Image (cartoon, rainbow, N blue to C red):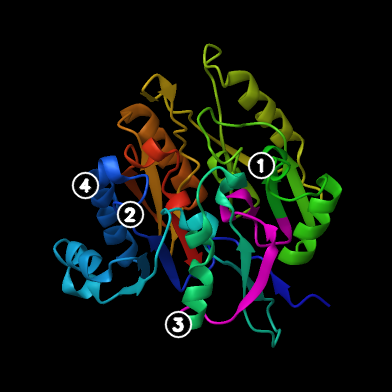
């Protein structure tokens, strides 16, 4: 009997991890702006649960947060000194398995290999963060999965046995030398999943991850799927996201029922140096009692996204947070964070 499962993100969390930006990261040219965003995100997180900050310079980071957070909020922050390549905790953080109800099993932390999204970017320091956190006693023991490349943003769980992923990402080069059948077998075994649902459409222009699931489709309670939708035929992404919507309508739950589908708007194109940035409302962060929604200074779309996500999580506060600086490095709020249970 399987005594462990891959939890949904809306289950009770112990803390959230942020990996702090610094001058040695790709944020160097906009370090002031991204630090402001991290402080704002830290303020929201600490209103709802503890925060773990991984940073090469704890004293400086503590000083930055102390100037903005209340003493009570600051007491909820744990600082951990560690060398880092970048800031995307969702993809280098450990994944958690929890014991099923009535089981005497203990939670397990899975440490997968992070290789910079298919060897696109330096990753050696970030791939070692989990081991350093474990050796310090902050995370506890890790299950070593360094033989398998898997980013947290590439998998989404409903907490009931189904793991969602995308073929675009997991079958991309320089990750694992396995075909779809082999990858599905490994995901089911390592994540204790009953099944894997593969989505084959919906890549955002400008996305460095090859199509992470957390940029296009997210799980919510009550067999609900929030998904990015394109209603503009002139948008270059329109056909791709129409195909994604058709695939979602065909999906069924493990017990054979259609999903409740809630469409999220596609942000109007945000350009930088002639290239489109991968803005998305699907990259929201679930906290104990709140959902933090990325916004892009697009009042109508921002409001509609917050309203829709609020329908999916009626028991949580919806907190908008400006993500325009984050997407300059091709990610958003969920990408920056990892939850522990």
Q: Would you name the residue on which mark 4 appears?
A: 32
Residue 49 rendering spot, x and y as whole percentages: 37, 70
Q: Secondary structure at mark 1?
A: helix
As rendered, which of 209 and 161 lies closer to the eye? Answer: 209
Tags 2 and 4 in contact by the CB under 8 Å rule?
no
Mark linked to residue 169: 1
Kindly report the distance in space between the C-alpha atoms of the residues bearing marks 4 and 3.
30 Å
Q: Which residue is mark 3?
A: 136
Q: Is 160 included in the stretch rendered in magenta?
A: yes
Along the horizontal axis of the image, is 190 left or right of 119?
A: right
State yes or no: discs 3 and 2 in contact (Cβ < 8 Å).
no
Q: Position of residue 170 (x, y in %)?
A: 70, 45
Residue 154: assigned label = none
Q: Which residue is mark 2?
A: 21
Label 3 and label 1: CA atoms lie apart by 32 Å
- Characterize the local packing of mark 4: few (<14), some (14-19) or many (20 or more) Cα atoms within 10 angstroms: few
| Discs 3/1, front | 3
Which of pointers 4 and 1 lies earlier in the amino acid sequence?
A: 4
Residues marked 1 and 2 touching at CB (< 8 Å) = no
Q: Of marks 4 and 3, which one's residue comes earlier in the chain?
A: 4
The mark nearer the N terminus, 3 or 2, is 2
Residue at 41 percent of width and 54 percent of height: 87
| SS at mark 2 in the image | loop
Rendering quarter of residue 78? bottom left
Q: Quadrant of residue 159?
A: bottom right
Q: Could you give the CA–CA distance between mark 1 and mark 2, rounded to whole angstroms?
A: 25 Å
Q: Residue 14: image x %, image y %?
A: 46, 74
Foreground of the two, 219 or 40: 40
Q: Residue at x 79, y 59 (%)?
A: 186
Q: Mark 1 or mark 2, which is nearer to you?
A: 2
User: What's drawn in magenta, residue-wise?
Assistant: 137-162
Neighbours of disc 3 within 10 Å: few (<14), some (14-19), many (20+)? few
């Amino acid at each position: 009997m399987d005594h462990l499962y891959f939890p949904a993100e809306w289950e009770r969390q112990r803390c959230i991890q942020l990996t702090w930006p610094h001058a040695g990261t790709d944020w160097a040219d906009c370090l002031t702006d991204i630090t402001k965003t991290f402080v704002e995100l830290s303020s929201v997180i600490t209103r709802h649960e503890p925060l773990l900050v991984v940073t090469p310079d704890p004293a400086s980071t503590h000083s930055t947060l102390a100037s903005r957070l209340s003493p009570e909020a600051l007491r909820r922050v744990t600082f951990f000194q560690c060398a880092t390549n970048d800031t995307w905790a969702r993809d280098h953080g450990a994944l958690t398995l929890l014991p099923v109800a009535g089981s005497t099993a203990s939670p397990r932390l899975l440490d997968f290999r992070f290789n910079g999204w298919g060897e696109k970017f330096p990753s050696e320091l970030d791939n070692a963060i989990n081991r350093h956190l474990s050796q310090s006693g902050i995370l506890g023991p890790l299950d070593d999965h360094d033989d398998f490349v898997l980013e947290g943003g590439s998998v989404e769980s409903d907490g009931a046995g189904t793991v969602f992923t995308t073929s675009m990402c997991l079958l991309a080069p320089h990750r694992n030398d396995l075909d779809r059948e082999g990858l599905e077998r490994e995901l089911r075994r390592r994540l204790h999943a009953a099944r894997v649902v593969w989505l084959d459409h919906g890549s955002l222009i400008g996305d460095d991850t090859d199509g992470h699931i957390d940029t296009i489709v997210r799980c919510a309670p009550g067999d609900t799927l929030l998904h990015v939708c394109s209603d503009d035929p002139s948008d270059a992404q329109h056909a791709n996201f129409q195909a994604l919507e058709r695939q979602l309508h065909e999906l069924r739950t493990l017990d054979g029922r259609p999903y409740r589908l809630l469409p999220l708007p596609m942000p109007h194109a945000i350009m930088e140096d002639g290239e489109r940035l991968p803005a998305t409302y699907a990259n929201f962060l679930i906290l104990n009692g709140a959902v933090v929604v990325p916004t892009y200074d697009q009042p109508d779309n921002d409001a509609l996204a917050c309203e829709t996500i609020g329908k999916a999580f009626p028991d949580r506060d919806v907190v908008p947070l400006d993500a325009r600086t984050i997407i300059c490095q091709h990610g958003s709020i969920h990408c920056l964070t990892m939850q522990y249970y």
